[in-house]
Image: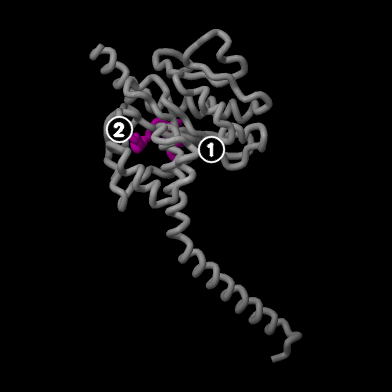
């Protein structure tokens, strides 16, 4: 075959493309399970960091298998609810079959459309309920987990993450322990609007449902504030019921 002909070029290019595609498919198939395990363990670390099952440093020092075991031993139950607070499904919590609700982006849209029926709730021992939050930061999605005390109002802890926020500014929502700790002991006001405030000098008037925003990270803070309020509202009937039950017991 004439190596200078168009036919040779097309055939050669086709063979190379097919070989590269086959190699990539093989690598993806081999690495897929490991990537899924890493993603699951990372989500569990973030949830347990919010619930303060162990310190964040201790959780990130553990391997994936240890994280799966710790979660399975620390969780009481996991399930899904709808926007009315009704239970809609169960999520497995045994080590070999741990189920998580992924697709927070799709759930975020469904919440805003008023028709979400698969909001996950992870209830840890001691009655701590962990819920996710999701929204848009300055450069991409931001998300995280908020742990509530058994009363459904007071915040036990939080953990936030992001895809591409600015290092040293918006990225502080993940990188700075002091920022996450500001949420511990705060509460959500399910009877008012906004339910929670993350903003400039938000703590100045002493409100328990407010945290000061990160200086220099205005857009990331606004995005996180919006995400918190959207998702807190979505869980308000479920968490509000817990608050009412605690009040009645007192």
Q: Which one is in front in this view, the residue at disc 2 or the one at disc 1?
A: 2
Location of mark 1 (residue): 161
* Circle 2: element type: loop
Q: Are marks 2 and 1 in contact (CB under 8 Å)?
A: no
Q: Which class describes the residues within 10 Å of circle 1: few (<14), some (14-19), or many (20+)?
A: some
Mark 2 to mark 1: distance in Å?
24 Å
Look at the image and tell me in which quarter the C terminus lies: top left
Q: Is residue 37 above or below residue 57?
A: below
What residue is rendered at 49% in x and 23% in y? Answer: 183
Q: Earlier in the sequence, mark 2 or mark 1?
A: 2
Which residue reaches farthest bottom?
1
Quarter assignment of residue 74: top left
Q: Position of residue 12 (x, y in %)?
A: 65, 81
Q: Nearer the viewer, residue 77 or 231?
A: 77
Give the residue at mark 2: 125
**Residue 122 is inside the magenta segment:** yes
Residue visible at 50% across and 36% down? 143
Are there few (<14), some (14-19), or many (20+) residues within 10 Å of tag 2? some
Q: Secondary structure at mark 1?
A: strand
Left or right, residue 65 beside residue 127: right
Residue 63: x and y in percent read 44, 50
Q: Is residue 235 magenta?
A: no
Magenta-tinted stretch: 106-123
């Amino acid at each position: 075959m004439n190596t200078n002909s168009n036919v040779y070029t097309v055939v050669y290019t086709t063979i190379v493309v097919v070989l590269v595609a086959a190699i990539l498919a093989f690598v993806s198939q081999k690495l897929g399970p490991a990537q899924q395990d890493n993603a699951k363990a990372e989500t569990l670390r973030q949830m347990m960091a919010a619930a303060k099952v162990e310190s964040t440093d201790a959780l990130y020092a553990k391997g994936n298998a240890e994280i799966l075991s710790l979660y399975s031993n620390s969780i009481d139950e996991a399930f899904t609810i709808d926007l009315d607070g009704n239970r809609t499904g169960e999520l497995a919590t045994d080590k070999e079959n741990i189920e998580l609700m992924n697709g927070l982006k799709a759930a975020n849209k469904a919440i805003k459309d008023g028709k979400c029926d698969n909001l996950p709730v992870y209830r840890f021992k001691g009655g701590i309920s962990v819920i996710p939050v999701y929204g848009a930061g300055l450069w991409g999605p931001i998300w995280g987990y908020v742990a509530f005390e058994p009363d459904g109002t007071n915040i036990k802890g939080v953990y936030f993450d992001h895809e591409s926020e600015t290092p040293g500014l918006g990225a502080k929502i993940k990188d700075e322990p002091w920022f996450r700790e500001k949420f511990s002991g705060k509460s959500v006001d399910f009877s008012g609007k906004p339910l929670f405030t993350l903003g400039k000098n938000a703590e100045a008037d002493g409100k328990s449902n407010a945290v000061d925003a990160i200086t220099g990270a205005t857009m990331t803070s606004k995005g996180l504030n919006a995400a918190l309020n959207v998702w807190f509202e979505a869980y308000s009937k479920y968490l509000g019921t817990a608050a009412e039950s605690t009040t009645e017991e007192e």
